[in-house]
Image (cartoon, helix red, strand yellow):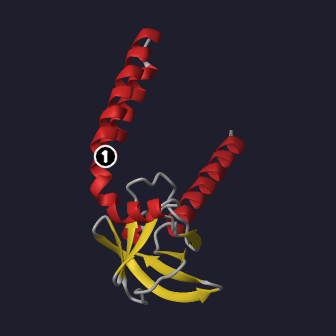
Amino acid sequence: MRKLGALFFLIVLAASLWIGARWIAGRGPVKATILFHSAAGLRGGDLVIENNLAAGRVVRIDRVDDRDAVTVRLDPAHRRAIVTDSLFTIDGHRLLVTNAFAVGAPVEDGALLQAKDDKVSRWLAKNGSKVEPLVESLKQKADNGVETVRGASNDEAQKLKEKVGGWVDQTKSKIR
C-alpha cells in the first residue's frame, strides 16, 4: 500500500511540474518575425493591430537578403492574435493582422512567418474584416450541419446536403 501511495505522489508531482512549466512558458509576451517583400512605412514602435485592438508593437525591422524581417512582440493578453495562417498588411505606420479566414494554431515564441504577397491574400488582408461576418455565419451553419449529420439517417443526410448546396449558391450570389 505504501508503494502505491509513493507512486501516486510521484505521478501527481510530475503532473504538477508539467502544468507549472506550461503555465510559466505560456504567460509572457510572444515574439515573432514576419518576412515581407517590403515593409515600407513601418518602423520600430509601430502598433500591431488585430480585430481593431492593439495587440503589440513592432520591435525592429531588419533587411535579410532581399526581404524585410519585421519582428513583433505581442502583449501577453493577445498571445493568440497571430496564428500560423494569419494575413498581414501594412497600413501607414501600423501592421494589420487579419484572422477572418485563419484556422491555424497560435504562433510559438520565436516563430518565423512568411507574409503572403499574392493579390488574393493582399485583398483579404485589407478587406477581411468586411467579409468576416459572412465567414462566421458560414462557419456557424457548417458546425450546425455537422452536428445534424452526426445524428441523421441517410435520407436526412441527403436532404442536408441539398440544403448546404443552396447556402453555398446564396453565398456566391452575395459575394458577386
SS category of the residue bearing label 1: helix
Closer to us: 111 or 64: 64
Task: Write down the residue under mark 1.
Answer: 175
**Which residue in the rendered view is the most extreme toward the front?**
176
**Which residue in the rendered view is the most extreme toward the right?**
3
Closer to us: 172 or 90: 172
Give the residue at x 55% y 71%: 109
**Is any part of residue 81 visible from this angle?**
no
Q: Is residue 143 above or below residue 48?
A: above
Give the residue at x 60% y 59%: 18
Q: Choose top left, top right, bottom left or bottom right for residue 129.
A: bottom left
Q: Amino acid at mark 1?
A: Ile
Give the residue at x 51% y 59%: 85
Q: Is residue 74 above or below residue 163?
A: below
State the image coordinates of residue 163 (x, y, percent, origin top left): 34, 23
State the image coordinates of residue 69 (x, y, percent, origin top left): 55, 82
Closer to us: 148 or 37: 37
| Structural crowding at the residue carrying mark 1, measured as other residues with C-alpha within 10 Å and reported as few (<14), some (14–19) or many (≥20) | few
Give the residue at x 42% y 53%: 101
Q: Choose top left, top right, bottom left or bottom right for residue 158.
A: top left
State the image coordinates of residue 160 (x, y, percent, origin top left): 38, 20
